[in-house]
Image: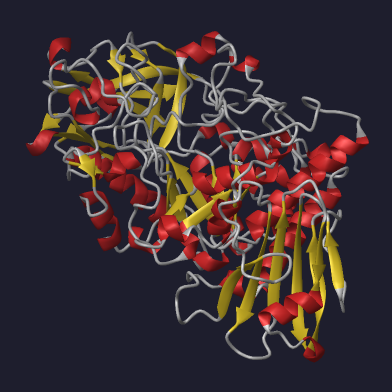
Amino acid sequence: MTAQYTASLPLNMHLGATAIESGVNFVLFSSTATAVELVLYRAVHSNQKHSLRDMDVECIGQFPLTRKRYGLWGVFIQNLGDELYYGYRVLGEDRLELGHAFDESLVMLDPYARHIIRVNQSNCGFGVKLLGQVRKTCFDWGDDKTPSIPWKNTTIYEVHVKGFSKLNASVPEILRGTYLGLSHPESIEHFKKLGISSLQIMPCIAFTTSEKLRAQKLENYWGYDPIAFFAPSSRYAVEDPVKEFKTMVAQLHQAGIEVILDMVLNHTGEGGMHEQTYSFRGIDNTTYYQTTQQLPKTYIDHTLCGNSLNIEHPQVFKLILDSLRYWVSEMHVDGFRLVLAPKFSQEHGGFSRDNSFFKTIFQDPVLSQVKWIAEPWDKSPQGYQLGQYPAQWSEWNDQYRNCVRAFWRGDKGMAGSLASAINGSEDVFGYYKERTSASINYITSHDGFTLQDLVSYAEKHNQANGENNKDGMTDNLSCNYGIEGPTADAMIEQNRDRHKRSMLATLMLSKGTPMILSGDEFANSQSGNNNPYCQDNELTWLDWLHIKPHQELFDFTSQLIQLRQAIAPLNTDDFYRNEANIYEALWIDTRGEKFVDWNLPEAKVIGLIWLPQQKGKTIWSLFFNADERDCFIDFNQLCGAQKIEIEKGFWQLDLDTFQQAAFSKKSLEHYTISSRSVVVFSFHFQ
């Protein structure tokens, strides 16, 4: 079979497999290999769908690559069609003590592969698990444009591609759990009714499941073990993952919804040195991975996933940047959340916001135009860097999450922390950022309890993960109101529902960028599992049968988002110290006086009033009552304290989380704020 293809010197040294009309140019980087061989395959059964299941393949040719300069190897193969698959045999010195991990019995996946298939059986005598495919994918983007939503108007919805639509009977069965399911009209209608602006999609680049999980009959559900940084995962495709991913993005863009990708670029799914080898380790181990100087066969692991990519190496740095540009230029995504981002902040052994990675991004004409979000912590010695990223970056704010949870659980001494969080966490972000939207405010995320579980479980219940309930966060700042898990007790359910509404209201009434976990809007539960990374089943898939009995919670969440958009002070991106701000923010007590009890442990009721700098503008006042007792507001007294001429207007109730739904009530003279509730009032001039 080799004879029908003609091999020659590479036409150029562009990494990956580049198809042109006359053939395909293959280029691979390996600075330590002594020889590289291209191995070509075709499917044994032509009717196999490459993206749905493992394939049986047969070898049809092997071609040596020519070494060029700088560790690049290449070959050009003429007359190569689309239905062929490829990988590399990489040969080198078998010296593990030097960190080399070559294995000539294995075929390696190209790190630059755009399309990937999984191999079941092969007849060539080499071990092969994953192969790339050369495909000339044509896609008509039409007039696709990024929605370009300003940070100050952004509301993020964190979502898993499969988990979102897998159980949604309104989506055609073949599309459930896929890219096309996430962008199906039924899904888009849900997003639009809810009112979110941006999807933050959990990892959907090609990833693997460890042998340890497979042995326990578990799957890598979250996707935080990538194996190819250019290829969308075929797990979420019907037939063609690249085409279907692009279709998803185009359909979401048409609906005005941004696509932000959760990107894992700090480690790979190859794990530790003695785990499965798919690509990087067998191609150039000491280039791609960080190893110790004293013992090169030992990985440095700051991710707790077995390895850390050697980002300071020029070739790895290039791989990462090439990948990011590809997802923006070719796949049209609107931004990234970088997982364990301190890995990208290290240079010469220390954290630096002026390092090469950040500088390159913001000098790049492509990457500088999209949104950037950091998960600002990892397990390295300087691994917690909240608030330290460059001004253009936003960051997941776990301090916001913790203080909101603690305040509404009733913990003492949280009033000051909550006030800071509601004002945009200026103490964290004010120095470097000078914009409140840099704080990604969230109460729940994929990592931890859902909102429903946060008020239903005092302890984690992760037994299904096979780690004796030792995995996942231990201190969740949660409560169960007397019974662990589901209950038929109506009073407990009412308390739980009010607790959820008050946390959601706090989220939407805080300066910063709010993020909602998908399913929280209709009380989705994971049965108390706060680390379901390996549960690809009904435990993690959203149960759409919940939405009808929890329609009031969905409507309430949607109304909150609308209310946020209507409150002018929340639609600015400045901290209140900015003289140009149109509102002055004052913290008050229930009498309207300046709040002075910040250091009082029992202080559980705080108020905020936004006073406009221009006369005649709406005045907004918020109260947060985490006490077990009701409190009373007299608006004549409040107006007197704040010098508001009450005869020139009227107070209106816009929100009370004691109620099942947001509503309006005009011309208030006084009001009782129920325990563990949030209320919003507005004063309108006549």
> What percent of the width, then of the height, locates residue 231?
42, 38
Residue 663 visible in the displayed image: no
Q: Nearer the viewer, residue 581 or 22?
A: 581
Q: Is residue 522 left or right of residue 207?
A: right
- Residue 216: image location, x then y, percent: 56, 10
523, above or below 275, in the image: below
Q: Position of residue 487 (x, y in %)?
A: 86, 28
Residue 66 sits in which quadrant?
top left
Residue 634 seen anywhere in this rendered image of the structure: yes
> How was the colour assigned to the protein in this rendering?
secondary structure
Query: Residue 518: percent from the left, percent from the top?
Result: 66, 44
Residue 647: name its quadrant: bottom right
The residue sitting at the left extreme is: 69
Vertical position of residue 151 compared to residue 20: above or below: below
Q: On the rendered image, what quadrant is the N terminus found in?
A: top left
Task: Name the residue: 30% across, 43% down.
Answer: 344
Pick the residue in front: 495 or 232.
495
Q: Across the whole image, how many numbered discs are drawn on residues?
A: 0
User: Can you say whether 395 is above or below 118 in the image?
Assistant: below
Which corner quadrant holds the C terminus? bottom right
Residue located at (58% from left, 16% from top): 218
**Nearer to me, 153 or 682:** 682
Q: Nearer the viewer, residue 299 or 660?
A: 660
Tell me if 123 is positioned left or right of 684 in this view: left
Q: Name which residue lies at 28% across and 28% down.
A: 4
